[in-house]
Image: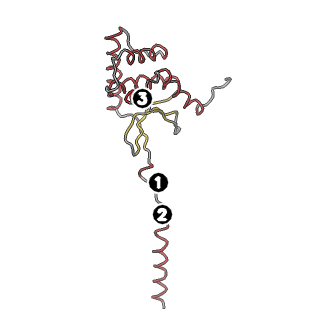
Amino acid sequence: MRHIQRMRGHATCYLLLPMLILLAAPVSAQDRVWISDLSALDRQYMTRQRTSIDDIARRHFGQGFIGHKDRDLALLQRLLDSGLVRPDQTRELQAMGKILGDLLADELGMHWVIYEDKQGRNRALRYQETDNYLFPMTMISRRQEVANQTPVREIYQRAVDAITPYRTPLPFQ
């Protein structure tokens, strides 16, 4: 009898074990998101991107990107309108996204991070320590690659509009 009771106890454990595993199972790997700081290599790569698109603008228009929103957005648009950066030039389009992202980060109080999920590893802008992200590196390139001619200024404004509801209002506004 004792032997049977012991077996019943083990059987109960074996029946409960799968339920505990299911309850304790973490979110599937497909749904996981990892956020990390930019590595030194990321920062170096992004600096090279910025320099490369700045060189194109200086060479062809005699002016570079200075961090002034209106001027830099107009210069980005000019690069597209003139055909100096074409839809098949993904690297240059993403460099333009770096410029766009720096402007957004400045205006919205965001910072660059690495965002990794099942789709891959991306450089993104994060609003404070929230789960609100923008992906400016591809905002221009993905549109251009499918012949979407949305003006750069409109892309910028849509990004601002997407984050604004999550921003903490400043006092006396």
Q: Which class describes the residues within 10 Å of circle 3: few (<14), some (14-19), or many (20+)?
A: some
Q: Is residue 52 left or right of residue 6?
A: left
Would you name the residue on which mark 1 appears? 27
Quadrant including the C terminus:
top right
Could you tell which of marks 2 and 1 lies nearer the N-terminus? 2
Say which of 26 and 90 sits in front.
Answer: 90
Q: Residue at x 38, y 28 (%)?
A: 141
Q: Residue at x 55, y 31 (%)?
A: 163
Quarter assignment of residue 28 = bottom left
Would you name the residue on which mark 2 appears? 22
Would you name the residue on which mark 3 appears? 143
Q: Which class describes the residues within 10 Å of circle 1: few (<14), some (14-19), or many (20+)?
A: few
Q: Where is residue 99? Give x, y as percent.
A: 41, 22
Label 3 secondary element: helix
Could you tell which of marks 3 and 1 lies nearer the N-terminus? 1
Q: Residue at x 43, y 34 (%)?
A: 113
Residue pushed farthest right?
172
Say which of 81 and 1 sits in front.
Answer: 81
155 lies above or below 84 = below
In the drawing, what numbered circle is on residue 156? Answer: none
Q: Is residue 29 left or right of residue 109?
A: left
Q: Where is residue 59? Give x, y as percent.
A: 31, 11
Q: Which class describes the residues within 10 Å of circle 2: few (<14), some (14-19), or many (20+)?
A: few
| Residue type, mark 1 in image | Val
